[in-house]
């Protein structure tokens, strides 16, 4: 294609202006919700239920981390971990409502209000939420100091690495309005490197922190496990995820956990009906979905 014929925003025809300006219709899949400014755009109170924990989220990988965590805690018998989970539909801009922004000034799911103490505490960033709950219930985080540090190494690894997977690879491979080889190559290389990091570690370790299932696994599985199975970006073949044998073993092993199955359903508003639990207030909510499945 000659340079003259290239559309203005194609890489070969684009020269950045002196000062960047917001083009709200840039053609990307999330152009209608992405903005270069923070803060609330509308008054919108959040609903609240009776449990100590109020979760405002959606069943994206970042959201699933937290619902998996709650379901694990409840499965372990921590009755104080009961929670109400409300859907924040990020496609409709619910994350810019005033009530949500009060809990998370960064306008991203998941966000949690912990009312279990004397004063409600807001918790945002999925890694912070996992650590908050692990410390509160003294669960899913190793007690041995060296193992605890290893668990936190991988928890923070996830927080730093997943943006290259989601915002980098996923965006340019699946969502950008046109395919840019340079971007897809750059982020495919990085994501494959990350998969190799995980695969090598899991060759010698059952779980991320060693022999104990922990918040490190809960943080990593919703993103990297889903990638392995082609559930995010439909990229399993493109990235040859089947070749990461230890990662595949770990992905399937965690997927068998009841809490992982439940966590994936909470605040999910798409897919098969029996996979969706738009709001969660009680363990019996899942049973209704099982009945839906049985009755087809
Ligand atoms: N680092 C954050 C990332 C959260 C995040 O990116 N959430 C996405 C959904 S997966 C979101 O709310 N996007 C809405 C938006 O960007 O407006 C975390 O781990 O909690």
Image (cartoon, helix red, strand yellow):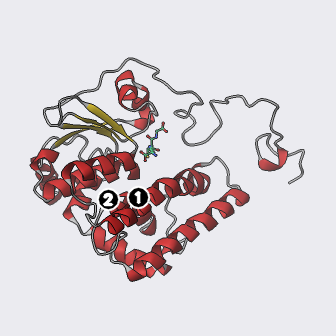
Q: Secondary structure at mark 1?
A: helix
Question: Left or right: where does residue 129 sit relative to residue 244?
Answer: left
Spatial CA span between label 2 and label 1: 7 Å
In the picture, measured across the screen, residue 15 lies left or right of residue 165, that is right
Residue at 41 percent of width and 68 percent of height: 229
Q: Viewed as shown, does residue 143 lie left or right of 60?
A: left
Where residue 96 sits in the image (x, y, percent)? 44, 27
Residue at which label 2 appears: 215
State which quarter of the image contains the N terminus. bottom right
Q: Which mark is first along the chain, 1 or 2? A: 1
Q: Residue at x 33, y 40 (%)?
A: 57
Q: Position of residue 216 (x, y in %)?
A: 36, 61
Q: Secondary structure at mark 2?
A: helix
Question: Pointer 2 and pointer 1: residues touching (CB < 8 Å)?
Answer: yes
- Asked which quadrant contains residue 232, the reply is bottom left
Residue in the picture at 80% in, 39% down: 8
Check residue 155 in the rendering and tell me which mark sits there, or answer none: 1
Residue at 19% over, 42% down: 280
Residue density around tag 1, few if under 14, some if 14–19, many if 20 or more, within 10 Å: many
Of all residues shown, which one is farthest toward the top? 43
- Can residue 125 be seen from the camera position used here? yes
Quadrant location, ligand no. 1: top left
What quarter of the picture does the C terminus occupy? bottom left
Would you say 24 lies left or right of 166 here? right
- Judge the density around disc 2: few (<14), some (14-19), many (≥20) Cα neighbours within 10 Å: many
- Rendered location of residue 71, percent (x, y): 20, 54
Label ID, residue 181: none
Give the percent coordinates (x, y) of residue 11: 78, 48
């Amino acid at each position: 294609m000659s340079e003259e014929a290239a559309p203005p925003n194609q890489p070969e025809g684009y020269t950045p202006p002196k000062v960047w300006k917001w083009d709200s219709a840039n053609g990307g899949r999330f152009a209608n919700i992405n903005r270069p400014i923070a803060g609330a755009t509308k008054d919108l109170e959040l609903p609240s239920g009776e449990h100590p924990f109020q979760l405002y989220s959606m069943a994206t990988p970042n959201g699933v981390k937290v619902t998996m965590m709650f379901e694990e805690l409840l499965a372990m018998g921590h009755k104080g971990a009961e929670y109400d989970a409300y859907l924040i539909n990020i496609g409709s801009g619910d994350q810019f409502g005033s009530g949500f922004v009060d809990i998370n000034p960064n306008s991203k799911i998941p966000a949690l209000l912990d009312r279990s103490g004397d004063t409600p505490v807001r918790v945002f960033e999925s890694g912070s939420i996992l650590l908050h709950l692990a410390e509160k219930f003294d669960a899913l985080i190793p007690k041995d100091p060296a193992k605890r540090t290893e668990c936190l190494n991988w928890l923070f690894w996830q927080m730093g690495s997943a943006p290259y997977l989601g915002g980098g690879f996923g965006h340019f491979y699946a969502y950008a309005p046109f395919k840019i080889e340079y971007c897809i190559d750059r982020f495919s290389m990085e994501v494959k490197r990350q998969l190799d990091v995980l695969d090598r570690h899991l060759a010698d370790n059952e779980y991320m922190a060693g022999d104990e299932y922990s918040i490190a696994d809960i943080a990593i599985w919703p993103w990297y496990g889903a990638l392995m199975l082609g559930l995010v970006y439909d990229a399993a073949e493109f990235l040859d995820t089947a070749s990461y044998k230890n990662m595949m073993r770990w992905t399937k092993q965690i997927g068998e956990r009841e809490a992982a199955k439940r966590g994936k359903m909470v605040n999910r508003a798409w897919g098969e009906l029996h996979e969706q639990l738009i709001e969660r207030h009680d363990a019996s909510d899942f049973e209704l979905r099982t009945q839906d499945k049985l009755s087809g």
